Image: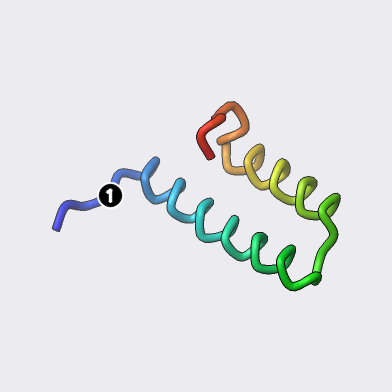
């Protein structure tokens, strides 16, 4: 099994966190505005703010 690079690990963590946000939105635990704010902040804090593919 090939070891992941730090960038790959960061992207996997981001995608896992996004999945959790998606669940919160789907179940009504957060609003669409809260989702957008959290998603944007999460991308910026993880250094992925300039990525359009996430």
Please tell me whether mark 1 sits on a helix, a strand or a loop: loop
> Circle 1 sits on which residue?
4
**Left or right relative to 4: residue 8:** right
Q: How is this picture coloured?
A: rainbow
Can you give x and y, in whole percent of width and height, for residue 12 in the image? Answer: 43, 53
Can you give x and y, in whole percent of width and height, for residue 2 in the image? Answer: 16, 52
Can you give x and y, in whole percent of width and height, for residue 52 in the image? Answer: 56, 30
Q: Quadrant of the N terminus?
A: bottom left
Residue occupying image coordinates x 53% and y 40%:
54
Residue occupying image coordinates x 85% and y 59%:
31
**Left or right relative to 25: residue 13:** left
Near-viewer residue (43 or 27) = 27
Residue at the front extreme, as displayed:
26
As drawn, 24 above or below 9:
below
Query: How many tags in the picture?
Result: 1
Q: Specify the quadrant of the image occupied by residue 50.
A: top right
Residue occupying image coordinates x 72% and y 44%:
41
Can you give x and y, in whole percent of width and height, for residue 18 in the image? Answer: 59, 55
- Binning the other alpha carbons within 10 Å of mark 1 as few (below 14), some (14 to 19) or many (20 upward) gives few
């Amino acid at each position: 099994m090939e070891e992941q690079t730090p960038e790959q690990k960061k992207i996997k963590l981001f995608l896992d966190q996004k999945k959790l946000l998606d669940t919160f939105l789907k179940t009504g635990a957060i609003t669409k505005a809260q989702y957008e704010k959290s998603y944007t902040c999460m991308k910026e804090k993880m250094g992925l703010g300039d990525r359009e593919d996430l």
